[in-house]
């Protein structure tokens, strides 16, 4: 069996049992970085190879596993740029809370990944550190803003990676690069030590090749942080034990209506419906649900993201607006121009949609919908920016509501571009979205496929 067909848990156990050296796992990733990063530009900073073997502590959950980190997470003694000219030379003196946790769990950090500037965008076309490119077609965007993390995982440059998600920035690149992306419930994972875009909408989370690996990463990343005002004191979930539970008696809603169908590529609609049928064949009950109410949620999320970003970066915009890329500067200017009335109305929409979703998930276990309405658009050229704006349509509502959402690969377009299936559930039910994602993954071949460039 090929090493990259094994889960992270399996590979950790091989290291623990001394069947594989941890240094070999990292060496495989470094070989891919050396070969592919000059083409795909997934990393802003690659750390030097660690010499010698790791200390013998094979009982830790991530023992010896090489991980990449989006360049928004503070890493002690390592450049943390936020993809921004303002922070190009910044070297933090301490680790973000989540970085502390993954280090304690035994992970090897091998590099900091490319991101859309200050995370305010979904193309990962960064004017300061260069464009990150989609491994399935290098003329196309990998999605963003965690594009470098998704590319690293899709191509074997890392076994898993950390991302952040404010309007879809974990799930979008996961979908466009053919990997798994999990946005946990707001407050499940600490934001301390992560460069903010929106204090109200930011969510840290993992990008992995397999659903079970996302469960393992969340087990490590999640947990209460008393120094983070957004962190919620709630018992940690057990995300792995029930992954293989049956789909019988699960009630699944599939999103329909104008909001879903008017802007979505027909191949993506078919792929999501086919995925729902596979779950139905496993015993789940499938019900169509009109999701037009999500339209206002997506608009409110966009307004709040830009306004919150403008608030955080107000001094930088006042002192050196020319240091921002043109697209990001325009979004910050738009955000600064919203009135307090407009922001209050967006917050009211947030409250209303959250309640609507609470009622929905009293009846259904999960909601299925596309992760993105279109496959990866081109990075450059006519309508490239306009096409990219469509990518947050189905992800942004669940940042506004703070609900857990998972993107898993669910096939390819006729052009060979990956398609993502999004699975959403009630607050704190990460185990539920992971369980449904695993059931679908286990019945399909998509998670075994890698882009040709990575082979």
Image (tube, rainbow, N blue to C red):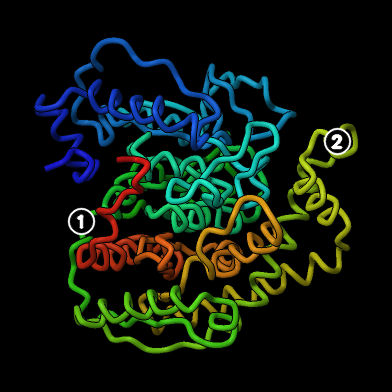
Dot 1: within a 10 Å radius of its alpha carbon, few (fewer than 14), some, or many (20 or more) residues?
few
Which residue is at a point 67% across and 58% down the rendered structure image? 384
Residue 258 sits in quarter = bottom right
Q: Is residue 1 visible?
A: yes
The residue located at (78%, 53%) in the rendering is 331
Q: Is residue 238 visible?
A: no
Name the residue beneath numbered marker 1: 241
> Does 372 sit left or right of 154 as displayed?
right
Looking at the rendered image, the quarter that the C terminus falls into is: top left
User: Of residues 113 and 286, which is closer to you in this image?
Assistant: 113
Q: Which residue is mark 2?
A: 322
Closer-to-camera residue (89/375):
375
Vertical placement of 360 versus 34: above or below? below
Task: Kindly state the secondary structure of the residue where label 2 is placed.
Answer: helix
Location of residue 157 by image quarter: top left
Within 10 angstroms of label 2, few (less than 14), some, or many (20 or more) residues? few
Position of residue 292 in the picture relative to residue 217 (left or right): right
Q: Is residue 182 above or below residue 89?
A: below
């Amino acid at each position: 069996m090929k090493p990259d067909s094994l889960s992270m848990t399996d590979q950790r156990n091989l290291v623990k049992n001394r069947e594989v050296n941890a240094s070999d796992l990292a060496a495989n990733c470094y070989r891919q970085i050396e070969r592919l990063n000059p083409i795909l530009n997934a990393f802003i900073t690659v750390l030097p190879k660690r010499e010698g073997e790791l200390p013998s502590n094979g009982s830790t959950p991530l023992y010896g596993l090489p991980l990449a980190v989006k360049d928004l997470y503070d890493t002690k003694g390592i450049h943390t740029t936020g993809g921004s000219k303002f922070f190009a030379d910044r070297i933090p003196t301490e680790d973000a809370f989540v970085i502390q946790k993954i280090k304690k769990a035994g992970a090897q950090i091998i590099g900091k990944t490319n991101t859309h500037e200050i995370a305010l965008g979904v193309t990962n076309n960064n004017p300061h550190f260069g464009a990150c490119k989609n491994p399935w077609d290098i003329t196309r965007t990998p999605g963003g803003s965690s594009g470098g993390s998704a590319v690293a995982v899709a191509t074997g440059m890392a076994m898993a990676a950390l991302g952040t998600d404010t309007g879809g920035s974990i799930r979008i690149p996961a979908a466009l690069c053919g990997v798994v992306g999990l946005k946990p419930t707001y407050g499940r994972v600490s934001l301390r030590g992560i460069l903010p875009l929106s204090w109200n909408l930011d969510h840290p989370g993992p990008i992995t090749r397999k659903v079970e690996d996302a469960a393992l990463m969340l087990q490590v990343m999640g947990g209460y942080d008393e120094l983070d005002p957004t962190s919620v004191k709630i018992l940690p979930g057990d995300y792995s034990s029930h992954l293989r539970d049956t789909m019988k008696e699960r009630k699944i809603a599939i999103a329909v209506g104008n909001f879903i169908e008017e802007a979505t590529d027909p191949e993506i609609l078919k792929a999501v419906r086919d995925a729902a049928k596979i779950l139905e064949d496993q015993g789940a009950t499938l019900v169509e649900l009109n999701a037009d109410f999500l339209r206002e949620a997506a608009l409110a999320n966009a307004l709040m993201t830009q306004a919150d970003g403008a608030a955080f970066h107000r001094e930088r915009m006042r002192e050196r607006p020319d240091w921002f890329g043109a697209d990001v500067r325009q979004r910050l200017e738009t955000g600064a121009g919203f009135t307090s009335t407009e922001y209050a109305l967006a917050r009211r929409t947030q409250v209303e949609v959250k309640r609507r979703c609470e009622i929905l998930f009293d009846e259904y276990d999960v909601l299925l919908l596309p992760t993105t309405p279109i496959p990866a658009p081109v990075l450059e050229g006519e309508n490239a920016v306009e096409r990219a704006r469509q990518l947050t349509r189905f992800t942004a509502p669940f940042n506004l509501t703070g609900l857990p959402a998972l993107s898993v690969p669910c096939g390819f377009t006729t052009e060979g571009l990956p398609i993502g299936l999004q699975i959403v559930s009630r607050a704190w039910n990460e185990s539920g979205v992971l369980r449904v994602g695993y059931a679908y993954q286990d019945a399909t071949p998509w998670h075994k496929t890698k882009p040709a460039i990575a082979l």
